Image: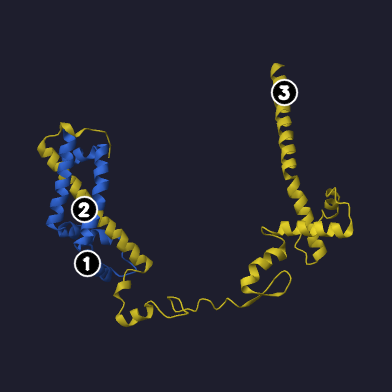
Amino acid sequence: MKMEDMSLSGLDNTKLEALAQDIYSDLVEDACLGLCFEVHRAVKQGYFFLDDTDQESMKDFEIVDQPGVDIFGQVYNQWKNKECVCPNCNRSIAASRFAPHLEKCLGMGRNSSRIANRRIASSNNMNNKSESDQEDNDDVNDNDWSYGSEKKKRKSDKVFLHSLKQHIPLVSFIAVEIHVLYVVFLSTCNCKGANR
Amino acid sequence: KTDQLYGHYCSCLFWLNHRLKELLRAKLTECGWRDQLKAHCKDVIKEKGLEHVTVEDLVVEITPKGRVLVPDSVKKELLQRIRAFLAQHAT
């Protein structure tokens, strides 16, 4: 169907009436087709005859309105005081305390870096270590970073992670600088080649 | 011929069509046309079988009946709106 932007003003009344009938006819057909598609989908998805269920079966699906129970009739707070076993430290933790425990246990989450810092600071004060340059520690613990079960290892992992986070801005700046120099180098090479 | 005429759409007719679709659907639901046709669909499905019925089966059986079952009041109102729109844009 070719579509041009033809104006309606050139048409006389009979033509306009015929056009009106056409438009109406199209609209009705569209409605019929829409219904056919909807019904067909309902049939194929299996929900077309759902409202034909008998009264007896319908009672199984009525909304439940009892205290302590949700609308489906299920008890909804039965897991509140269950205990879970932490996969990391194998301790038994209450369900409502499980998520915060896991955060600290794995050394992830929002507060774990703060807690690590505090521990480092307090251990510095106790041991009188010269912690001016944290990079020395990084090299020692560089080889593996895993969720170890020993507390000592975990602490130095936190140190490593923390110092790395501090150096990220510097590292990315240096990387950008190197990239810029490389691009400049390439362009000067190309210029030289073109001139020859 | 009217086919050729309708084939040249004005952009304004698209808008009219779009607006009237919604209106027609609402009116047909309101007057029970949909439920009537749905019941007829059930007969077709039972005849052809739930597993084997196709869109074509439904379209062929339902569309002619659907056209006929549109209430006169709905048809009248729709045509009225279309004519008014055309009159407005033809001047």
Give the colour in which the image draws chain A: yellow
Find residue A109 and report its image quarter: bottom right
x and y, in percent, of residue A29 in the image:
22, 53
CA distance separating discs 1 and 3: 80 Å
Q: Is residue B25 above or below residue A104?
A: above
x and y, in percent, of residue A10 in the image:
16, 31
Q: Is residue B82 above or below residue A88?
A: above
Instruction: Give the quarter of the figure containing the C terminus of chain A.
Output: top right
Instruction: Give the quarter of the figure containing the N terminus of chain A.
Output: top left
CA distance separating discs 1 and 2: 17 Å
CA distance separating discs 2 and 3: 71 Å
Question: Which labelled disc corresponds to residue A28?
Answer: 2
Give the colour in which the image draws chain B: blue
**Crowd rating for badge 1 (residues with CA inside 10 Å; few <14, some 14–19, many 20+):** some
Hey, which residue is sitting farthest left in the picture?
A14
Q: Which is nearer the N-term, disc 2 or disc 3?
A: 2
Find residue A52 and report its image quarter: bottom left
Q: Amino acid at mark 1?
A: His
Q: Amino acid at mark 2?
A: Val
Q: Is residue A70 above or below residue A38?
A: below
Q: Residue at x 79, y 55 (%)?
A: A159
Provide the chain ID for the residue under circle 3.
A
Residue nearer the viewer, A139 or A181: A139
Q: Marks 1 and 3: same chain?
A: no
For label 1, the residue is B40
